[in-house]
Each structure stands twice: as C-alpha cells, then as structure tokens.
Image: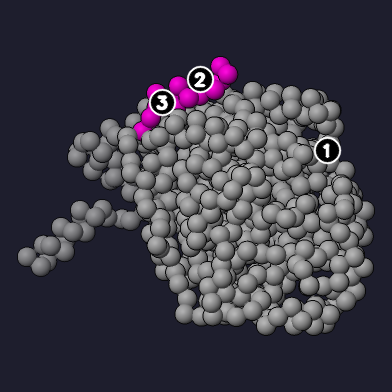
C-alpha cells in the first residue's frame, strides 16, 4: 500500500476532506476542555506510562496470574499465537454451542484478526452492535477510526444506507431519527443472539477480571441476554491491580471523546450464574514488539484515538489512507512492525509535529518512533527508488562545499529558465499541488557578504 | 497448551528492563461541594440528579416523571420505591424483560468527578435489566458521593465472581456525524436519587461477591 496514493483519492473531494478535518478537530477541542478539568492530568499520564512499563517487565508472570485468577472465577482462558489461531478458537467455542447468531461489541483485536469474514464463511451471522461499526458493516467497509468508526460518513450517507437496509424514509438524515431506527433494528438482534463477543479495554492480573467501556451499552446488552460470552484481548491489555483502573479510566474517556468517563464501564469477574465465559489471550506479534526497545512503548496504547484526532495528516487524509485496522500516528508505528515492506510509506504520513505525543494519555513517544521507523526502513532498503536517489544525491552534494556552491549557482540560474514540463513532472512530488517558491537571484552567502562588507 | 507456553516463552525472552510499580493511592482531585459537583456532572452527561430526604419524596418525584407515569411495566429492587408490577426474581429468562419500561435499582456509591454510579449484580437476578429497560432510576445513599475514581477503587474489592458497572448517564451515541443522541440501545433516561443526609459518609464497600465472604475494605 502507498499512503500518498490512497490519500490523494481522499483529498480529491476538497469540501469533504475539509469537513472531515473539522469534525475531528471538534473532538480534539472537546478532549482539551475535558483534560483542563483535571489538575493532576500530567501525573495521571506519567503514572499510566509507569504502570505499563512495570507490567511489560513482568508480563509473563502477570499473564499467569490473570489466567489462574480468571480460571478460579469460573472463566475459560485460551491462548492464541496469531490471528488464525484466535479465529479458530472463537469458531470452535461457537460451534460447540451450536451458535449461528453472534452479536459483537467493538474490538479492534477482532478487526486485526479479520474475525468477521472468517466466521461468516463458516455460517455464523455476525452483527456489529456499536452504531458506528454497524454503519460501516452495512456499507461493507472497515472502520476508518478506532473510536469513531463511521467518522468519514455524513448523516446523508448514513440516511441513504439505512434507507436501503433498515427501510427508513428516503432522504431522511436526522441523526435522532436514524439512531432510533438503528435502536429498533439492533435490539431485535440482541434479543435473537445466541452468543455475545466483546473486546477488552483492561484486564486485571490480581483479580482475573476485565473491563469493557462503551457509551451505548451495546457490550452489556450483547452479553447479558445470551448465556455465552467470549472476550478477546491482546496480551498487552493487562494491568497489575484493580486500583490501576482508576488511573486508566480517568484517562480513556477524556482522551477519546472528551467525556469524563464512558457511559458504561463494566467489570466482569467470572461468568454470570448459569452462563459461560471464555477469554482469548492473543499475541499476534505483540511479544516480538516487546523485545524492540525503540518501539515497545507503542504497546502502551489504550486505543483512545486522540493521536488521530489531533494529527494534521490523519484529519486531512482519512482513516482508509493508512490501509490498516489501526490508522493514524499509532497505526503508522504498529503496521510497519507487522509488515515493513507493505507499510513502508506510513512513517512518512506525518509532519513530525509531535502533537500526537503531546496528547497521548500513556506517553507513547509517537513522533520519535515515526522517525525511528524511517531510519529502520532506510536501513532495510524499503524506501522507494525516488527517495533513495534523492537522499544519495543530497548526501554527495552536502558533503562537498564546492559542489554545494556550484549546484546552488546552477539551480538559481537554470531552474527559472526551464520550461514548465521539466520542473513540474512526475519526478517532482513537491510540485504536484503547489508552486515551487521563486528562486532568489543571490545565495545567502552572497547576501551575507554584501551586508557584512558594508558594515565592516 | 503449546501456544500458551510459546507465548509465555516469547514474552520472557523479550522481557524489558525492570521498572517499579507506582503507587496510585491518595491522589486525585477533591471538591468542596461533592454533591453539587456530582449533580452538575450527571446533568452534563445527560442524567438527572435528585436529592430526596426519604422514600416518600422519591415516590413523589417518580410520580411526576412522565417516563414513570406512563410506564406500563415497572421493576423495583429498592424496597418502598416505586410501584413495581414485574418481579425480577420470578422471571426465568432475561429476554422477557424486553418490554419493561422502568426499573429502579440500588447504586452503591457515586463519583463526583465524572457523574458515575457504581452498580453491582448483587441481589439483581438478571443484570440485563440495567441495560434493557427504557428508563432507569438508581438510588444511592446521599452520603456516598466520592471525589474521584481513585477513592472509588480504594472501596472496591473483587474477591469473588460478580458483575459491577460504573454508569454515567443514559445510553448514548454520537456515531452519526458527531451529533449526540441520548438512548442508543439502552436506557433513554437515567435518574439518580441521592437519598437521606448528604452530611454523613455512608459509602459502603461496593462489591460483595456472590459467593464466599466479602473481603471489601472501606
């Protein structure tokens, strides 16, 4: 995949790209207001980051503790090395219970594992119950944002989609009316479901329980009606103690949408009476990332989406331009870790302004990691020919004073005289949407010498 | 079990340098007027806060609530509050709660910084009632309003199996063009009754497991 090409598609519709930018900036502004209400915000971030560092340094022990405690509470714990094994485990549980209809709340992990299409191929109806996820599911699209899956759709888009699938009135686009239609539709699905699947926001080693956060209450509806609950989590979701939840829940809602906390923060400890609870622990590349000093902090991520909302590139290029489950700055670090050759363009989808690092509630040094990835990709020879050639040429010219002066003089004299097609062509990515600045008649050295001469 | 061992081995091989676990106790924002802060936050997240001296006052406020006055099926797990006509304990299958209009349930304590109320499934046969009803009312002791989430977790213990949830306002969504819509799939409204005297600290240890004895601390 190439980020610039996918982004070009998105920005072709200028007004829409602008609307997208503004919609996300609105969420960022709400986050700022919420954060300003908490005087100890920086202490919270620092503490969260330290809790994560401690957990990762003792992860194996905490995983074992979590497994023992969860089992003691009556849950079944499964381990999956990769996406395929995860999907197979989930399917196996569903098949043993004869489940044909599954309701799911938001889980980026199951998106990462492409669980839905896998289960559908095996005859299981999978309904995403988060409204945003249901919207993109009906549209046959993946989420374009991890917290706001349908942020790229206007209410008119949703109205047209619901008219087609839920038989709402043609042309209706009032969010209240559309949400009400979705409520009726999804409540039917909740009542008909034979099993519920949720993600996990935080799992607690000390107690063997886990927490799921939603605003709609869809996770709770999904698992409090059917008897079977499957919870899927990456191994990095673990925290040591229940009281650490105080730190993370205070950070999550405020960072994600500017809410002081999500409407529902549900704490599951063991199955409900007469019910069955399965917890699937998934590695899928996480243990590798743990061993890479420069990049391991990306495992701190609590999937709040704040780095996306603030990113000048994400806001203007849209979630699909990243070609991955997790887009934006954090996705641009996680994706190359998974597949460096395919995602080599993502660490360049950044101005390195550092705004992501400033808003990250768990202190991931996002823009430093993006820069580190650029270095790593260059070493691995994953850069495109044009970048490699330009860097080589720059390195030769910048190393020699004579060559540098000569090249400057030639450029100042020659470029303004060249016909347009020789300057603005496919080799000049810079000049694609903008004009080059006018070439100055004199170099800085010349100007400096003239002035210095007058003064001296 | 091969996968389990592989994952644990990989995690041990890639173990980062040691780091201390920070202390999280005794921290966090406090408020001069906790009840007022809680009421304001609850309203900001779409809920309603009512301070009631006694259950008679709760019933008077309920009677004046249009959602309650028009409700046909009512569940009440708070003795003396509301006129229940559905007995949760006599229902076998939670799906039967589909058409319950109003439920009144005990909350354990609330949190001023975010308008959340801690509710558990202790004594609640079907926890689905919290999410499936059209309108929900929670009754908490007025003295059980804490400042922040750190204080909340100091009170909670999770020794045995059970379910607990922080509920902050009614079910909501902003997934259609960032327009806030109250009543996504769950309750369309949330009323929190703070019962009795706000002056005394009556916050209990909030989490009594269904089995074994509670090891909750206050």
Tell me the quarter of the picture where residue B203 sits.
bottom right
Tell me the quarter of the picture where residue B182 sits.
bottom right
**In the image, is residue B12 part of the stretch drawn in magenta?**
yes
Question: Label 3, label 1: how many angstroms apart (C-alpha)?
Answer: 38 Å
A256 versus A79 height, above or below: below
Q: In the image, what residue occupies the spot 28% across and 32% down?
A: A396
Judged left or right of residue A225, residue A151 is left
Q: Position of residue A71 (x, y in %)?
A: 60, 32
Q: Chain of mark 2?
A: B
Q: Residues within 10 Å of mark 3 (few under 14, many from 20)?
A: some
Image quarter of the N terminus of chain A:
top right
Q: In the image, what residue occupies the spot 16% across and 64% down?
A: A451
Image quarter of the C terminus of chain A:
bottom left
**Residue at which label 1 appears:** A194
**Residue at which label 2 appears:** B6
Q: Mark 3 or mark 2, which has the lower sequence index?
A: 2
Asked if the residue under mark 2 is in contact with the one under mark 3, i.e. CB atoms within 8 Å, the reply is no
């Amino acid at each position: 995949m190439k980020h610039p090409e996918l982004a070009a598609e998105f920005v072709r519709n200028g007004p829409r790209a602008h609307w997208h930018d503004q919609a996300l900036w609105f969420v960022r502004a709400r986050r700022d207001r919420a954060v300003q209400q908490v005087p100890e915000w920086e202490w919270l971030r620092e503490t969260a980051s330290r809790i994560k560092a401690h957990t990762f340094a003792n992860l194996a022990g905490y995983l074992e503790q979590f497994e023992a405690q969860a089992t003691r509470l009556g849950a079944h714990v499964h381990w999956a090395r990769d996406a395929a094994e995860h999907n197979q485990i989930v399917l196996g549980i569903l098949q043993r219970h004869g489940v044909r209809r599954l309701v799911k709340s938001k889980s980026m992990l199951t998106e990462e594992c492409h669980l839905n299409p896998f289960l559908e191929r095996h005859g299981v109806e999978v309904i995403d119950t988060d409204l945003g996820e249901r919207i993109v599911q009906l549209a046959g699209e993946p989420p374009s944002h991890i917290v706001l899956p349908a942020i790229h759709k206007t209410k008119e888009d949703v109205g047209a989609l619901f008219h087609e699938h839920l038989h709402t009135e043609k042309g209706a686009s009032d969010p209240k009316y559309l949400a009400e239609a979705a409520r009726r539709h999804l409540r039917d699905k909740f009542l008909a479901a034979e099993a519920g699947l949720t993600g996990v926001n935080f799992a607690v080693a000390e107690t063997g329980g886990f927490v799921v956060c939603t605003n709609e209450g869809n996770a709770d509806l999904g698992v409090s009606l059917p008897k079977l609950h499957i919870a899927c989590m990456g191994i990095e979701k673990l925290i040591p103690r229940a009281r650490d939840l105080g730190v993370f829940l205070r950070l999550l809602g405020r960072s994600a949408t500017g809410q002081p906390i999500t409407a529902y923060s549900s704490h599951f400890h063991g199955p409900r009476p007469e019910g069955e609870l399965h917890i699937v622990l998934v590695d899928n590349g996480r243990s590798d990332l743990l061993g890479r000093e420069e990049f391991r902090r990306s495992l701190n991520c609590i999937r709040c989406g704040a780095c996306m909302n603030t990113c000048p590139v994400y806001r203007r290029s849209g979630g699909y331009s990243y070609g991955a489950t997790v887009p934006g700055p954090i996705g641009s670090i996680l994706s190359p870790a998974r597949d460096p050759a395919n995602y080599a363009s993502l660490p360049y989808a950044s101005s390195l302004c550092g705004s992501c690092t400033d808003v990250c509630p768990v202190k991931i040094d996002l823009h430093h990691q993006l820069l580190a990835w650029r270095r790593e990709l260059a070493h691995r020879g994953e850069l495109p020919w044009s970048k490699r050639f330009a860097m080589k040429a720059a390195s030769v010219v910048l190393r020699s004073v004579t060559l540098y002066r000569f090249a400057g003089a030639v450029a100042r004299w020659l470029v303004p005289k060249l016909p347009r097609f020789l300057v603005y062509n496919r080799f000049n990515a810079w000049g694609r949407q903008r004009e080059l600045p006018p070439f100055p008649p004199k170099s800085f050295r010349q100007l400096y010498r003239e002035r210095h001469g007058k003064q001296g | 079990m091969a996968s389990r061992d592989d994952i644990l081995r990989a995690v041990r091989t890639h173990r980062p340098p040691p780091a201390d676990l920070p202390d999280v106790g005794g921290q966090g924002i406090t408020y001069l007027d906790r009840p007022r802060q809680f009421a304001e936050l609850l309203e900001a997240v779409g809920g309603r806060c009512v301070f009631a001296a006694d259950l008679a006052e709760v019933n008077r406020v309920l009677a004046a609530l249009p959602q309650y006055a028009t409700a046909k099926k009512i569940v009440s797990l708070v003795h003396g509050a509301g006129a229940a006509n559905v007995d949760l304990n006599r229902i076998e299958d939670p799906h039967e709660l589909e058409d319950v209009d109003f439920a009144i349930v005990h909350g354990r304590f609330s949190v001023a910084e975010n308008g959340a109320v801690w509710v558990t499934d202790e004594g609640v046969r079907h926890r689905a009632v919290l999410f499936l009803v059209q309108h929900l009312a929670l009754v908490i002791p007025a003295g059980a309003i804490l400042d922040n989430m750190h204080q909340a977790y100091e009170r909670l213990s999770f020794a045995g199996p059970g379910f607990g949830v922080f509920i902050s306002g009614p079910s909501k969504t902003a997934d259609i063009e960032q327009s806030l819509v109250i009543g996504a799939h769950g309750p369309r409204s949330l009323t929190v009754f703070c019962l009795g005297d706000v002056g005394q600290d009556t916050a209990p240890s909030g989490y009594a497991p269904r089995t074994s004895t509670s090891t909750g601390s206050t």
